[in-house]
Image (tube, rainbow, N blue to C red):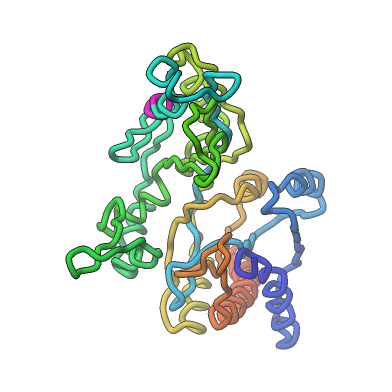
């Protein structure tokens, strides 16, 4: 999509052109352009590993595939959730059977599916039950969440297109899991959550008859806290879902991919100053700090491969941008200001290095 994140290549080049046009000093810059990220990022990580020596000593990594809390200031992404996906399938029959003949004796594959998922999630609250799927929120991230909650307030949940209906002359809206802004931020960034993103084994409503279906299959998407190892979570999830199936049904979980989340390294003084200066210059407001609920697998590798680098992970996915949706949009004024802010932060790096050299 344009915002997620086709604009990024053009924004990066525009930032470099701005530096060149103004004769601003800048460090050596290497660009990595990926065009298959939404298809699973199968190629990028091997290339990064192969090119590590060529990349050299990296002082600043800029990734423009992230989000923004609003369109009024620069936002730095402080963390990303991990993700594990797969297909859970419950089979009880080899073919469909008339429900009048079989129901009550042959167990419903959908009911077994519900029982199996109850091992993973408390369906009343949405809380994930395995303790290993949770982690403690670091103190600095909790403090930042409180600051960000004070800025964004109830827009954190009001921004979504909630279903609504008329009830006795008043409009009722579906409700979020919490209306506390701090808890809302943590729920979408530091807590594990299960989503069903697809289903198989169901006929369309217009084609449904009185038939007991032979199987039910769900595509599961598990979002994991930034500090939880995805591979370990997948292994535990598979064992939890498959073992001791009710009625000895055939229950299988086929892993469909995943990635461990990311917690940004500690911010250095020069980087913090540069971010705030750029945000004030182009937005008239200080830089905001926000965790994101999505996953960028590359960030963990870059943090591990370049442990001293600062990570400027930003983006234009603010309110109503609707990434992956049919009405995804690019907030052009914000993208322009973000591009200028990126250029300013790049220009601050050689200044910081010069100051460090002088101090030494």
Can the viewer see residue 120 in this picture? Answer: yes
The residue under the point 63% across, 37% down is 257
Quarter of the image where the N terminus is located: bottom right
Residue 65 position in % (x across, y down): 60, 61
- Residue 84 image-quadrant placement: top right
Drawn side of residue 36 relative to residue 267, left or right: right
The residue under the point 36% across, 39% down is 136
Q: Nearer the viewer, residue 52 or 99?
A: 99
Question: What secondary structure is the stretch in magenta mostly built from?
Answer: helix
Residue 158 position in % (x across, y down): 33, 66
Image: 317 above or below 47:
below
Instruction: Tell me where the magenta segment starts and ends, as one range.
Output: 115-119
Q: Nearer the viewer, residue 357 or 210?
A: 210
The stretch drawn in magenta includes residue 272: no
The residue under the point 52% across, 52% down is 294
Can the viewer see residue 232 in this picture? Answer: no
Residue 242 position in % (x across, y down): 51, 19
Image: 21 above or below 91:
below
Figure disc tally: 0
Q: Residue furthest bottom?
A: 22
Residue 249 position in % (x across, y down): 50, 16
Image: 22 above or below 253:
below
Q: Nearer the viewer, residue 199 or 54?
A: 199
- Residue 2 image-quadrant placement: bottom right
């Amino acid at each position: 999509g344009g915002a997620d994140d086709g604009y990024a290549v053009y924004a990066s080049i525009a930032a470099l052109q701005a530096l060149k046009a103004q004769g601003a000093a800048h460090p050596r810059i290497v660009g990595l352009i990926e065009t298959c990220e939404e298809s699973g990022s199968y190629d990028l990580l091997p290339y990064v590993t192969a090119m590590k020596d060529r990349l050299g000593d990296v002082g600043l990594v800029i990734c423009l595939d992230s989000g923004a809390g609003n369109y009024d200031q620069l936002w730095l992404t402080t963390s990303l959730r991990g993700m594990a996906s797969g297909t859970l399938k419950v089979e009880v029959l080899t073919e469909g059977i008339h429900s009048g003949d079989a129901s009550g004796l042959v167990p419903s594959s959908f009911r077994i599916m519900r029982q199996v998922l109850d091992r993973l999630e408390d369906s009343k609250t949405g809380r994930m039950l395995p303790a290993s799927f949770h982690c403690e929120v670091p103190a600095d991230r909790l403090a930042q969440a409180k600051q960000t909650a004070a800025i964004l307030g109830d827009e954190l949940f009001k921004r979504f297109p909630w279903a609504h209906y008329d009830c006795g002359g008043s409009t009722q809206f579906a409700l979020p899991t919490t209306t506390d802004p701090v808890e809302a931020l943590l729920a979408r960034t530091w807590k594990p959550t299960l989503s069903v993103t697809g289903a198989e084994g169901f006929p369309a409503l217009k084609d449904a008859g009185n038939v007991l279906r032979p199987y039910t299959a769900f595509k599961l998407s598990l979002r994991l806290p930034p500090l939880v190892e995805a591979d370990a979570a997948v292994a535990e999830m598979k064992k939890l879902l498959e073992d001791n199936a009710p009625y000895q049904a055939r229950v299988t979980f086929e892993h469909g991919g995943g990635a461990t989340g990311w917690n940004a390294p500690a911010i250095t003084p020069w980087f913090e100053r540069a971010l705030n200066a750029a945000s004030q210059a182009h937005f008239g407001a200080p830089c905001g700090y926000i965790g994101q609920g999505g996953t960028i697998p590359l960030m963990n590798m870059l943090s591990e491969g370049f442990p001293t680098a600062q990570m400027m992970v930003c983006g234009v996915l603010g309110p109503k941008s609707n990434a992956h949706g049919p009405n995804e949009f690019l907030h052009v004024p914000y993208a322009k200001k973000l591009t200028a802010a990126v250029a300013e932060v790049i220009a601050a790096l050689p200044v910081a290095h010069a100051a460090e050299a002088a101090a030494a």
